[in-house]
Image: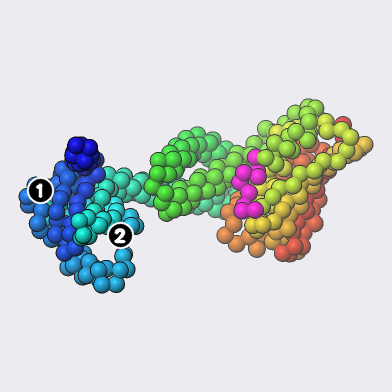
Amino acid sequence: MMIMENAALLKAIIENAIDGIITIDERGKVETINPSACRLFQYNPEEVIGNNINMLMPEPYRSQHDGYIQRYQHTGDPHIIGVGREVTGLKKDGTPFPFRLGVSEVQFLGRKIYTGFIHDLTREKEAEEKLKEYTAHLEEEVEKRTLWLKDTVKALQEAKEEVSLSLEKEKELGQMKSRFVSMASHEFRTPLSAIQLSAVLVDKYAQPFNNPQIAKHVKKIKNAVGNLTTILNDFLSLEKLEAGRVEPAFIEFDLVKLSEEITEELQMVAKENQDIIYQHTGMSSVVMLDPNLLKNCIINLVGNAIKYSGENTFIEFNTEIAQKHCIVTIKDNGIGIPEADQKHLFEAFFRAHNTGNIPGTGLGLNIVGRYVGLMHGKVDFVSNLNKGTTFTLTFPTL
């Protein structure tokens, strides 16, 4: 009685299983097929049972299957038994479809029976293709905006050189630049935010597929958006400086707390095994400077150290408050600055000749120098090619 009940329970489980289940004998003939498998392949049971399992396969798998069974029985070397894999099935109407197949071998009444468990992957594959298309579209849009902005930057630089011939043209350039920056601020920030959000959502929804290609392209989109945002911020800062709209607000604040926050923030975007080491010297941690301008300077310098240094390196970030001076030092072990380029380092739009394909606007150090000057400080640096660079910001203690 118990055996009959167990058999009935097993049959009920197989008949109501969500995935397809098919059993075949040693010759490849179908012995049983459950309702889910029938629905997947669009056959009635009597159309399949007794026929070779290869009727459910497209070519070339159909022709190869009998040979596979024979080789396995002769050599005992399985290619799929006990190991799940993605394969292609053939519906009754001739439509191929993807599914995950798991095969097990069972000894039953002195003979071998092979059981195949079939999980339809059609929806997953369709969703994966849609994600790939969406990711590719986002990447294309970011690439277009990147090229457009680079062309605009180049055009602005050429225009500045031309209008410097006269005061009237200089004034026209300032007006044109102000209009451009205002337009860029409004027109670029909204789509950049949308692209960044979409990239985050694509990354989130693509996680179940564990597809490294999707992750790679989403990362490229995020990096491109970050580069565009940096370019936009540099232009906004430069426009405000040249328009005389930057007024330092000297207030007392905790330099160590600010520096620790910056270190934590930038460590998240550092390269593989690239460590930012922060230390403070001095009994006091309070200074009287503009915290926003100082933060911009430090982020720019540490960001450069990250960009121009390799993986598995460390960046030293030190602050010191002495009796008459506050000193900020950022030291890296990166590519360094060629000696011939050092005299031009703080000029707008200038980039050293060894930066290669590393992204940048050539505005960061110009902005740093001007911000430091507004706070009555000075910038010094020491650099050796391929041996690293040290920047030192020195401010009088008020």
Can residue 37 be seen at all in this image of the molecule?
A: yes
Mark 2: amino acid: Ile
Quadrant where the N terminus sits is top left
State left or right for residue 291 relative to residue 355.
Answer: right
Can residue 187 be seen at all in this image of the molecule?
A: no
Front residue (pair 282, 45):
45
Counting from the top left corner in percent of width and height, residue 208 is at 40, 44
Quadrant where the C terminus sits is top right
State left or right for residue 368 relative to residue 325.
Answer: left
Q: Residue at x 30, y 59 (%)?
A: 81
Q: Residue at x 61, y 53 (%)?
A: 272
Counting from the top left corner in percent of width and height, residue 373 is at 78, 41
Mark 1: amino acid: Pro
| Res 81 label | 2
Extent of the magenta region? 265-273
Q: Residue at x 27, y 68 (%)?
A: 72
Task: Write down the quadrant of residue 323 in the picture.
Answer: top right
Is residue 334 part of the magenta span, yes or no? no
| Res 45 label | 1
Front residue (pair 162, 284):
284
Q: Give the farthest residue toward the front.
A: 1
Counting from the top left corner in percent of width and height, residue 10 is at 22, 41
State left or right for residue 172 relative to residue 254.
Answer: left
Q: The residue tagged with tag 2: helix, strand or loop?
A: loop
